[in-house]
């Protein structure tokens, strides 16, 4: 596996996105490198090595393991010029598309190409020179020119006398894993950018509301509107990293909306599970929770010492609806006959109806119990 600065493959295709390729029998190459029913190459290798390498039980173990494993494996001989490959099992041949006689006697660099990361190659070279175990990820190329990401695990093999006799290399096609990582990284970058833009958007809207309220001398109303804008901002900011999947975990959004009240010393218990809802449901649930919390602080359980709130949620009706339960206790005694719906109630009712949902409210003597159902 020794690598020098000079290498072949400059004429290989430049694409990093591996395409489906055909094996020598015309069938699609198996992505899991399986179907290694039996491999005669370990026996040929043992026969060619002579004495002092793998003998007796160790030779039998090597032959059986190499013949049956699905992992692509090769051995190189550092005692020969240019550290050539002296053994490559069937999985290695299936992975790379080369026949055995096209592999043996060559340095592993023949699998490299123009887009192979030279830093990873240098890391591999340093490990070989210092006889250390290492793992690198290399962009390699098959015989047909298609690229694949190779997770290469290499290390030295010594004989009983402590002499270095081989380097062991196992290869695994991690192209799908690499693509998934790239997709996740792109989603995180996009989420950060969206978060930044949404913060700016909410700040602009809040500024407009504040200025308008001051000009029309309705600062109190403007402050109420801004509190709702800020609640939505907290909910969306918390869920953006998860939004790329098309749904978000409801718990973090609920906790973000209620965090200012908890920090202010309000007694709150959050009992929900890891339910997921569509990203668009955040605005409905966020505004409803904000209105409940604001009312509890001004008129309900949090307006008196010892009052507390419990929030619970889950998915019902075979995943078609999200259910949110708000329960207050220890608050002032409530006379339902004196309750007059305010702006907050009107806002909640309107947005819940728009989401094909409903709100059921029960005013118990020591606090409100409300159940919200939203179609998802």
Image (tube, grey):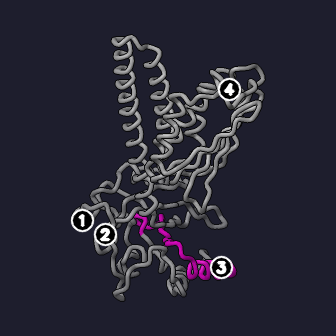
Mark 4 and mark 2: span between their CA atoms? 67 Å
Q: Magenta stretch?
A: 55-84
Query: Magenta stretch: residue 73 in it?
Result: yes
Q: Nearer the viewer, mark 4 or mark 2?
A: 4
The residue lying toward the viewer, choosing from 52 and 321, is: 321
Q: Nearer the viewer, mark 1 or mark 4?
A: 4
The residue lying toward the viewer, choosing from 280 and 155, is: 280
Q: Is residue 67 visible?
A: yes
Q: Mark 3 falls on what kind of element?
A: helix
The residue lying at 53 percent from left, 54 percent from top is: 134
Whole-percent x, y for residue 103 in the image: 38, 75
The residue lying at 39 percent from left, 73 percent from top is: 96
Q: Nearer the viewer, mark 3 or mark 4?
A: 4
Q: Mark 2 falls on what kind of element?
A: loop
Q: Earlier in the sequence, mark 4 or mark 2?
A: 2
The vertical placement of 105 against 181, above or below, is: below
Name the residue carrying label 2. Answer: 146
Query: Magenta stretch: residue 171 in it?
Result: no
Q: Earlier in the sequence, mark 2 or mark 3?
A: 3
In-image side of 154 versus 112 (left or right): right
User: To which quarter of the image does residue 293 belong?
Assistant: top right
Q: Are dots 2 and 1 in contact, CB under 8 Å?
A: yes
Q: Nearer the viewer, mark 1 or mark 3?
A: 1
Name the residue carrying label 1. Answer: 13
């Amino acid at each position: 596996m020794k690598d020098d600065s000079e290498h072949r493959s400059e004429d290989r295709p430049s694409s990093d996105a591996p395409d489906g390729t055909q094996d020598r029998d015309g069938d699609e190459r198996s992505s899991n490198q399986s179907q290694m029913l039996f491999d005669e190459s370990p026996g040929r290798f043992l026969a060619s090595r002579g004495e002092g390498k793998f003998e007796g039980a160790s030779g039998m173990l090597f032959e059986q393991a190499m013949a049956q494993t699905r992992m692509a494996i090769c051995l190189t001989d550092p005692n020969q010029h240019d550290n050539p490959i002296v053994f490559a099992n069937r999985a290695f041949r299936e992975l790379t598309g080369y026949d055995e006689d096209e592999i043996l006697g060559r340095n592993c660099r023949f699998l490299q190409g123009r887009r192979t990361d030279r830093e990873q190659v240098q890391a591999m070279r340093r490990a070989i020179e210092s006889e250390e175990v290492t793992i690198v990820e290399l962009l390699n190329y098959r015989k047909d020119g298609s690229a694949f990401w190779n997770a290469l695990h290499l290390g030295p093999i010594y004989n009983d006398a402590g002499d270095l006799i081989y380097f062991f290399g196992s290869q695994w096609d991690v192209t799908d894993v690499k693509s998934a990582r790239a997709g996740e990284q792109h989603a995180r970058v996009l989420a950060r950018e969206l978060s930044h833009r949404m913060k700016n958007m909410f700040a602009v809207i809040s500024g407009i509301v504040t200025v308008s309220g001051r000009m029309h001398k309705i600062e109190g109303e403007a402050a109420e509107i801004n509190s709702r804008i800020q609640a939505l901002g907290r909910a969306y900011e918390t869920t953006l990293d998860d939004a790329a999947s098309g749904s978000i975990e409801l718990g973090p959004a609920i906790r973000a909306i209620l965090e200012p009240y908890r920090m202010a010393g309000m007694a709150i218990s959050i009992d929900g599970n890891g339910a997921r809802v569509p990203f668009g449901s955040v605005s409905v649930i966020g505004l409803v929770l904000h209105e409940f919390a604001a009312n509890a602080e001004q008129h309900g359980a949090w307006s008196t010492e010892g009052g507390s709130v419990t929030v619970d949620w889950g998915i019902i009706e075979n995943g078609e609806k999200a259910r949110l339960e708000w329960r207050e206790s220890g608050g002032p005694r409530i006379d339902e006959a004196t309750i007059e719906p305010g702006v907050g109630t009107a806002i909640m009712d309107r947005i819940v109806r728009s989401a094909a949902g409903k709100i059921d409210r029960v005013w118990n003597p020591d606090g409100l119990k409300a159940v919200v159902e939203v179609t998802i």
